[in-house]
């Protein structure tokens, strides 16, 4: 399967029996893109924490690089239940009228 034309969401992995081939791979399920780690620096990637695009540099040594967005606080997004949605809409409508 050919690599898709998009900004990749890079993940650092080590390939090979001797654990000496360091690469970034795109984590999107329909993408087969791999690039050597040293060639990945300077490329755009998608942040694992917030989803924004940023440029990989040598300081990004995590398995799943982030842009510095304090990703650990942003990973768990709560869903709004239908009851909460109704309450929010009622509050908005009461402000309008």
Image (cartoon, grey):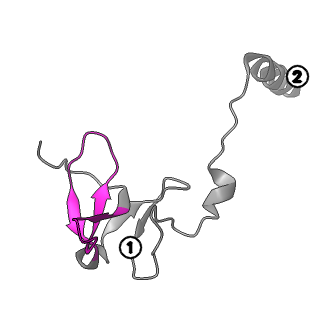
Which residue is situated farthest in the front direction here?
17
Quadrant of the drawing holding the C terminus: top right
Residue 66: x and y in percent read 51, 65
Residue 64: x and y in percent read 46, 61
Q: How many marks?
A: 2
Q: Please report the bounds of the magenta region as a residue range.
A: 12-37
Residue 53, by quadrant, is bottom left
- Crowd around label 1: few <14 · some 14–19 · many ≥20 (10 Å): many
In the image, is 20 to the left or to the right of 93?
left
Residue 76, by quadrant, is top right
- Check the image and report above or below for 66 versus 81: below
Residue 12: x and y in percent read 37, 64
- Crowd around label 2: few <14 · some 14–19 · many ≥20 (10 Å): few
Q: Please tell me whether mark 2 sits on a helix, a strand or a loop.
A: helix
Residue at 35% in and 60% down: 10
Q: Tags 1 and 2 in contact by the CB under 8 Å rule?
A: no
Residue at 31% in and 77% down: 41
In the image, is 12 to the left or to the right of 6?
right
Residue at 72% in and 28% down: 80
Quadrant of the drawing holding the N terminus: top left
């Amino acid at each position: 399967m050919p690599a898709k034309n998009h900004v990749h969401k890079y993940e650092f992995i080590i390939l090979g029996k001797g654990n000496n081939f360091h690469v970034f791979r795109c984590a999107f399920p329909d993408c087969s893109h791999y690039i050597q780690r040293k060639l990945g620096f300077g490329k755009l990637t998608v942040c694992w924490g917030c989803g924004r695009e940023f440029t990989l540099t040598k300081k990004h040594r995590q398995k799943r690089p982030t842009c510095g967005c304090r990703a650990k606080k942003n990973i768990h997004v709560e869903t709004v239940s239908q009851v909460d949605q109704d309450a929010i809409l009622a509050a908005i409508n009461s402000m309008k009228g």
